[in-house]
Image (cartoon, rainbow, N blue to C red):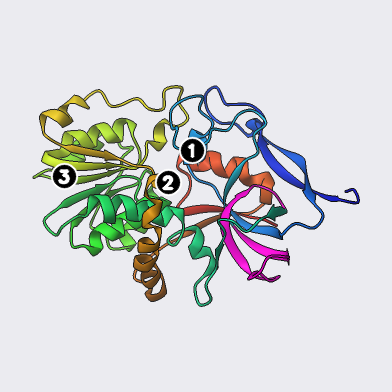
Amino acid sequence: MTDNTLTTRGLRLSARPDGPLLPRHIESRPVSLPLSPRLLLRPRYISVDPYMRTRMHAEGYGYIERWQATSALSGWALAEVLHSREVGFTPGDLVVGHLPMQELVASEASGLIRVSSGIDPLAYLHPLGMTGFTAWVGMEHLGAPMPDDTVLVNAAAGAVGSLAAQLARRRGARVIVTAGRPDKRAWLARLGFDTVLDHRHPDYAAQLLDAATEGVTLGFENVGGAAFHATIEAMRRHGRIVLCGLVSQYQSTNPRQGPANIATLAANRVKVTPFVVPHYLKHWETFQRFMAPQVMKRTLDWRLDIMTGGLDSVAAALIGVLEGDNLGKRVVLME
């Protein structure tokens, strides 16, 4: 600390991974902050999400700035205002924003969302945050299932998939969900989903065809790889697929590779709609008007997977998400 700055700790990418992300690829570093910023924030929870791995790829996924070696890491966070020279913000206020992964953050207040009273603040990192928005854009806005639809949601015990599946059910569709671990499938069954499959099972493709005897009319794809291949085989003619993510491929050297049977989609007149949420931000207020009452009335179940350990746990938390070991929305508690 000098007369004009104070020092905190933050995370950066030490090197771009050439293969799977490892703990050594993320390192802590000292960060200098102005002594009297407009806002001084202390992040309390940091979100870790699969898209962060795509920011480390050398090409593709151009909808968001890529991280280079030595790039500061950032993510959605719930933070407390410690000091304020900004009108409308007072110490003790809670805010949500896309912030540097640091123990303290200097902010100009741009892009911050103030947490409303009467709502669990952590909802702003899940159903009222970008994961909720992703589920809403993909299922409610683009997929728009109807009661006569058979909907398949892969990785339905994850942050986005769990909400997307419930949104489809809310619209009256029949919903088939998948998860790769017994405890995840048990949780989905407790949520009331009747058809819960294991997309990692050797016979998953056959099980899906048995579960959807007349074909899937709407697929919400999160996984990629063999699971996506099985989805394509199960699609009904003139069906549609909303392509949300390919998380099983993000750690590979060729993360955007399509399944070998992808050509059958055109033959069967299946409409595929890939999307990324930054392209739909004009719908943010519509999403909030839709989702806030669901959160207030508790008509949607949402679950946090909280890891302790602060910044030192971020690398393990993110790697775990990429390997599918989270149940619900993973966040890191800053201690």
Residue 184 seen in this snapshot? no
Q: Amino acid at mark 1?
A: Ile
- How far apart are the two marked residues, 3 and 1, measured between alpha carbons? 32 Å
Give the residue pinned by disc 3.
216
Instruction: Indicate the quadrant containing the C terminus: top left, top right, bottom left or bottom right.
Output: bottom right
Q: Which residue has dot 2 on it?
A: 278
| Mark found first going from the N terminus, 2 or 3 | 3
Q: Position of residue 40 (x, y in %)?
A: 72, 59
Q: Amino acid at mark 2?
A: Pro
**For the residue marked with disc 3, what is the amino acid?**
Val
For disc 2, the neighbor class at 10 Å (few under 14, some 14 to 19, many from 20) is few
Query: Residue at point 55% right, 56% down?
Result: 111
Q: Position of residue 77 (x, y in %)?
A: 58, 55
Disc 2 + disc 1, Cβ < 8 Å: yes
Q: Is residue 81 magenta?
A: yes
Q: Is residue 249 above or below residue 125?
A: above
3D distance between C-alphas at marks 2 and 3: 28 Å
User: Residue under circle 1?
Assistant: 64
Q: Earlier in the sequence, mark 3 or mark 1?
A: 1
Tag 1 secondary structure: loop
Residue 30: image quadrant is top right
Q: Over which residues does the magenta segment extend?
A: 78-103
Crowd rating for badge 1 (residues with CA inside 10 Å; few <14, some 14–19, many 20+):
few
Secondary structure type for disc 2: helix
